[in-house]
Image (cartoon, rainbow, N blue to C red):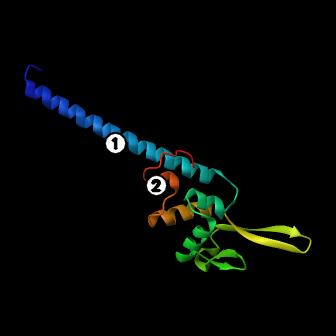
Amino acid sequence: MSDPRELAKLLNTLADEQDKRRKLEEENAFLTVKAKYYDQILNSKNSVPVTQIAKDYGMSAIAFNKMLRDYGIQYPIRNSWVLYAQFANLGYTQSKTYSIDENKSVMHTCWTQKGRLFLYKFLKERGVLPMCEQEGCNETSV
């Protein structure tokens, strides 16, 4: 301890370890947000309209649906969206019918939680992240 060079070396080692700890804490905070996102998706039993999923990505439903069309996941038919054959029988969506009046009803495609998780993984592989995972986002809720 009487040698200043040894003390300087110890202080540098301490500073390096503190930097490593700080980086691990930041990574842990990121993973906590990510785990919370997964938990919320997997624990919910309800299907959700595309508008809600789109908002997770900071997009409108119109833009989100068009993006999914461009990726070859779905196509429009009669004011609704349906999945292409390779995705159609995997439990990703549910159709819901809403009655307008006695003579008219409309059908909407909603995403199951399995489908929502599929979209998350599919889009992440292509660099499309939900708002809670985008760089510079301080939001911790999804």
The 10 Å Cα crowd at callout 2, few under 14, some 14 to 19, many 20 or more, is few
- Looking at the rendered structure, the kind of residue marked 1 is Lys
- Secondary element type, mark 2: loop
Residue 136 image position (x, y, % from top left): 43, 50
Looking at the image, the residue that sits furthest to the top is 2
Residue at (66% x, 75% y) in the render: 82
Provide the residue designation for mark 1. 23
Residue closer to the observer: 16 or 86: 16
Residue closer to the observer: 124 or 117: 124
Quadrant (top left/top right/bottom left/bottom right) for the N terminus: top left
Residue 101 image position (x, y, % from top left): 89, 69
Judged left or right of residue 36, residue 104 is right
Provide the residue designation for mark 2. 134
The 10 Å Cα crowd at callout 1, few under 14, some 14 to 19, many 20 or more, is few
Which is more foreground, mark 2 or mark 1?
Answer: 2
Residue 86, relative to residue 119: is it above or below?
below
Residue closer to the observer: 87 or 125: 125
Residue 142 image position (x, y, % from top left): 57, 50
Q: Quadrant of residue 96?
A: bottom right
Q: Whole-Å distance between the Cαs marked 2 and 1? A: 18 Å
- Secondary element type, mark 1: helix
- Looking at the rendered structure, the kind of residue marked 2 is Gln
What numbered label is drawn on residue 4?
none
Residue at (71% x, 67% y) in the render: 94
Residue closer to the observer: 44 or 7: 7
Residue at (39% x, 39% y) in the render: 25
First in sequence, mark 2 or 1: give its number: 1
Labelled pair 2, 1 in contact (Cβ < 8 Å)? no
Residue 133, relative to residue 126: is it above or below?
above
